[in-house]
Every structure is written in C-alpha cells, then in structure tokens.
Image (tube, grey):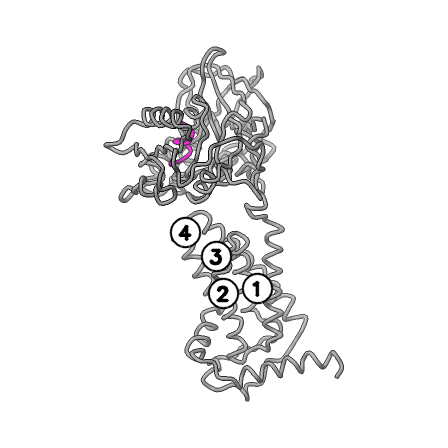
Amino acid sequence: MHSRKLLPHLDRWAFDRIAAREWPGAQRVLPRLTRSANHGLLWFGVAAGAAALGGRPARRAALRGMASLALASATVNTLGKRSVRRARPLLDAVPMMRQLGRQPFTSSFPSGHAASAAAFATGVGFENKWWGLTLAPLAASVAFSRVYTGVHYPGDVLAGAALGVGAAFAVRGMAPTRAQLAPPARPRAEAPALPRGRGLYVVANASSGQRSGPRPDRAAEVHGALPQAEVVVCGGPDGMPMDKALEEAAEQALARGGALGVLGGDGTVNAAATVAVRHGLPLAVLPGGTLNHFAYDLGVETYADAARAVESGEAVAVDLARFQVGPHQDGQYFLNTFSIGAYPELVRIRERWAHRIGAWPAGILAACEVLRSSTPLSIEINGERHAVWLLFVGNCQYRGLGTAPVRRHDLADGVLDVRVVHAGRLAGIRLLTAALLGTPRSSPLVGEARLPRLRIGGLPNGTPLAYDGEVSAVPGELTLEKRNEALTVYRLLPN
C-alpha cells in the first residue's frame, strides 16, 4: 500500500480499535475531562490554583505553562487547522454514551486539546520536572479523551501533542528558565558540610514576610529542613534583638567550627551578612521574606535548596557593596541595591500601607504619592553636578528577560551597577515605571555605568536613602565601593 494511504489507513484502524474496546471507568471520567479542557479552562484552573497556593516557583511555572499553551493554541488555530483540512471521524463505531453532546465542526487535524495539554505540562516541567511529571498523566488523559469520545483520530492527537511540546520549547527559547540562567557556580568557596544542620546556628526573623494573620513558627520551619540546627527566633514582641541574636549565634558557630544561618527577608540577610563577614563565617540563607531578592539571585528558592547545600558543604564566594561617610568609617554593606532620591520615600510610604492593602497595591499608591509631592534632587556624582529623580546602585550588574533589570546573573562580577534617572521631560512617568518594576528601565533619561567605586556629594544632611529594603538618612558625602568575593554563602553547585 502506498505510504500516503498507509498512514490514514492505520489511523482509522487504531481509531476503530479504540472505539470498539471497553475501557473500565473511562465512560464516567473521560467525556467530562474532555469538556473541562474546552478553551483551556482546565489548565487555567490548575495555573490559578498554583499561583494562589504555591510560592514564587509555582507562580513562575504556572505562567510558563500558560504562555506555552497560548502559543500552541494560536499555532493550531492559525496554521494547523487551516493548512490541513481533515474531516472529523465518523461516529458510527463510537458508543452513544461516549459521544459529546455538541460535536466540534473545525478541522480534525491537529488536536487543539492535545496541543494545549502537552504545552502546559511541558512548560511547567521546564520550571520543575517533578511538577511536569505529575501533570503528564492528566495531560495524556485529556489527549486520549479526544479519541475516546470520537472527535479526533489518534494521528490528530499525536500531531497536536508534538506541536504543544514544540511550543513549550519555543517559549523556553524566548524566555529561558532560571535553571538556564542560573548564577555561575564560581568562585567556589570552602564551607563545612553540616549533616542535618548540626553545627548551623540560625537566626530566624519572626516578622519577615508576614503582613497579616498569625505569625509562622519559624523554628519549626527550620527544623523541618535541618532537624539538628540550633534556632534563635527574634523580631517578635518577646524575641531577642536581632543584633544580639546574630552576634551570639556567630560566636557559637565560630567556637564549634560551624556556620551562621539566617531566615528572613533581604534586610535580615543584610544584617546577617555583615556579622558573617566580620567573623569569617559562611552564611546559609533560608528565604523567608516577602521578596527574597538575594536568595533567589543566588539560586536558593526554598528551604530545601538551602538545606541540601548546607548538608553537602557546597558554597560560593559573592561580592558585597559598601557605602561609607569617610575613609576611616566602617560603613554599611548592601547585598542588593542602594538608592537615593524619590525611591527611599516610596519605600517608606509603601511599607506604611503594605500590611493593610498588600505590597503591590501599596507600591502603586506610594509611587503616585511620590510623583505628586517630590522634586528632583541636586547631587554631585563623581564630582559632576546633576539634577536627578533617582540614583540606583546595584551590587553587581542587574539584567532580566526584557528591558527591566530585575535580577543578577553573576554575584561576583566586581562592579557597581549605577543607573541615574535624570530630571527632564516625562521623568515622572519614568519614575513611576521604575517604582513599579523595582529598578529604572533603559530610556534616554537613564544614565548607566558599571564602576568599581562611586562618590556622591552635595547632599543635604538627612537626605533619605534606601538599601536592601531598609530606609535610613544620609549624614553627608558618601563613597560606594565593592568588596569582591567577601562573603561565603551556601549554594548548590551544578554537577
């Protein structure tokens, strides 16, 4: 038989065999399952549940899955069904109880349901392979339900699934996963392996990451990942002061050849990093704050990530940045960002409202208030006078999957990422965009430089500044500089 006729013949033969066979329990499940997947509703529901109940990794996986589904669906409807016009199967061999009440009338090739199912499961799997494997049986059941109910030939389903997988690969090519953009595992650093957390002294901030509702049991969270770690909880009404807790934990870790750990947000991690550097201790970061910028850029997204690194003794050296008033002052470290101008005021207003309406709405409200009431700041940058809305300095170069620099690829590149939003036409709109995205966007009003050192002068005493989510006041002229590879942090290394 000619090959052009052989494939359709095999397709119809497989369809008839499936239609003639009894599938225990399928009659009650598969027709309902195929209807639930109409217009992608099943996958929208899964994505919404993951976004609502999961953390940041789950939201990212849900977004990738939906982007893959959208591309697959668009390809099926604009190219696939218009390129190959194939009639739907005849339903004579399909039992009435299996058939759908409303039969589709579009081309049978390829299956849109199979494409969407495969695209969503594959997209999620690119973010987390175990989640993708968990969704695979559901996706396969949706695809098979199209043949079971008689609306597609098996070849239509296989072609749709292949197209869906291809769409997920295309999305990954346009927007690489965090695994593809993981921070380099260099320079590696020496750190003790602490099985089950024995020898790790963790200071947990009970106030981090919790805007409302009951406070989480931070000690139980740590012990769930590292059962033998020593935990001190601070930040609550009855807790030990943070500075004292960190110093005592560091002294005990130093005496026992262990390591310092911290559970909290970026401000808490900043305080712990300062203590760890002073005592020459490696630091284990457990992301327990609202944003966790440093931990995520490091590649530590869960307590389990931190625990595996601590138990195996895998660590890297990262840069610290510091601002100081004079040459003989100790200065203040920052792990992520430093800024002066309108942004510190925005942070102050946002924090005042965040516990009432949420961080994102509070950020919008704060940005609008700052635009209404703020004026540009006249400062000297490396000896040159500028009128600016905002001066942003990042510890290492920020980049992202678009025009907004939202994360760092390398935490030991030796540079300060300096961005200045100059006063000028539409500067207020630029500031609003910068506030909502967290950092300034590339535009004609934004000046950029990568420097090892920066001098800022001409500031009135008391000018507010923000660093790692904390707000303080400028006592005078400032010098910002790098301390390359100054901090050792636990982080899983690639095989």
Please tell me which of labels 4 and 2 falls first in the chain. 2
Task: Look at mark 3 in the image and give the residue it sits on.
Answer: 131
* Residue 321, percent from left and from top: 51, 24
Residue type, mark 4 in image: Gly
Disc 2 and disc 3: Cα gap in Å?
A: 18 Å
Q: Are marks 1 and 2 in contact (CB under 8 Å)?
A: yes
Residue type, mark 1 in image: Ser
Task: Look at mark 4 in the image and give the residue it sits on.
Answer: 54
Residue type, mark 2 in image: Gly
Q: Is residue 305 above or below residue 75?
A: above
Local crowd at mark 2 within 10 Å, few (<14), some, or many (≥20)?
Answer: some
Task: Look at mark 1 in the image and give the residue it sits on.
Answer: 73
Q: Magenta includes 147?
A: no
Stretch in magenta: 262-271
Q: Is residue 145 above or below residue 118?
A: below
Task: Look at mark 2 in the image and give the residue it sits on.
Answer: 40
Disc 3 and disc 4: Cα gap in Å?
A: 12 Å
Could you tell me which quadrant the C terminus lies in?
Answer: top right
Disc nearest the viewer among 1 and 3: 3
